[in-house]
Each structure stands twice: as C-alpha cells, then as structure tokens.
Image (cartoon, rainbow, N blue to C red):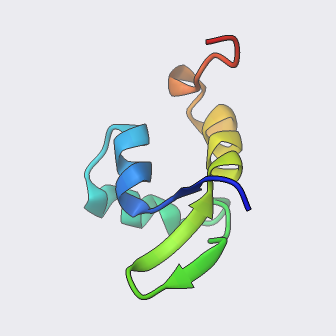
Amino acid sequence: MGRLYGTSEIADRLGVTRQRAHVITRQKGFPEPYDELVMGSVWRVEDVEAWIREHRPEIAEDPES
C-alpha cells in the first residue's frame, strides 16, 4: 500500500490551510483518493507527489535529498 496523506498532510505539504487543501483535492486533475475512511479521504503519497511535481514544481522535493 505505501504511505498515505490525509487532507491535513496535503495542507502541510502545500503550505495551505486544510480548507484550501480540501478545495484543491476536489479539483479536476487532482488524484482520486486511494480510499474513503470515516475520518475522510486518503491519497497515496506517490500520487500526490507526482501531482505536486507537475502542478507545483517550486515546492517539489528534490529526490536526491
């Protein structure tokens, strides 16, 4: 399965509020959630990081670090 991000982790990763992250995760082109839990949706880290590399390259992590 690998690691997962919830909305809070996505907000932290993007440097936005949880409310803004919620809006971003509902936009066309954002990866589909891996699963829906009682606490909310979760996404595979790999999927979110790929989206960040494409849509927010200025905050993409250097794979060498």
Left or right of residue 5, residue 28 in this image? right
Which quadrant of the figure has residue 32? bottom right
Q: Position of residue 30 (x, y in %)?
A: 62, 59
**Residue drawn 66% across and 45% down?**
51
Q: Position of residue 41 (x, y in %)?
A: 50, 75
Q: For the N terminus, give its image quadrant.
A: bottom right
27 over 47 or under it: above or below: below
**Residue drawn 42% across and 79% down?**
40
Q: Nearer the viewer, residue 34 or 59?
A: 34
**Residue drawn 30% across and 44% down?**
16
29 over 48 or under it: above or below: below
Q: For the C terminus, give its image quadrant.
A: top right
Q: Position of residue 13 (x, y in %)?
A: 43, 39
Counting every numbered tag in the picture gives: 0
The residue positioned farthest toward the top in the image shown:
64
Q: Position of residue 27 (x, y in %)?
A: 54, 65
Q: Nearer the viewer, residue 13 or 21?
A: 13
**Residue drawn 33% across and 37% down?**
15
Left or right of residue 9, residue 58 in this image? right
Left or right of residue 16, residue 32 in this image? right
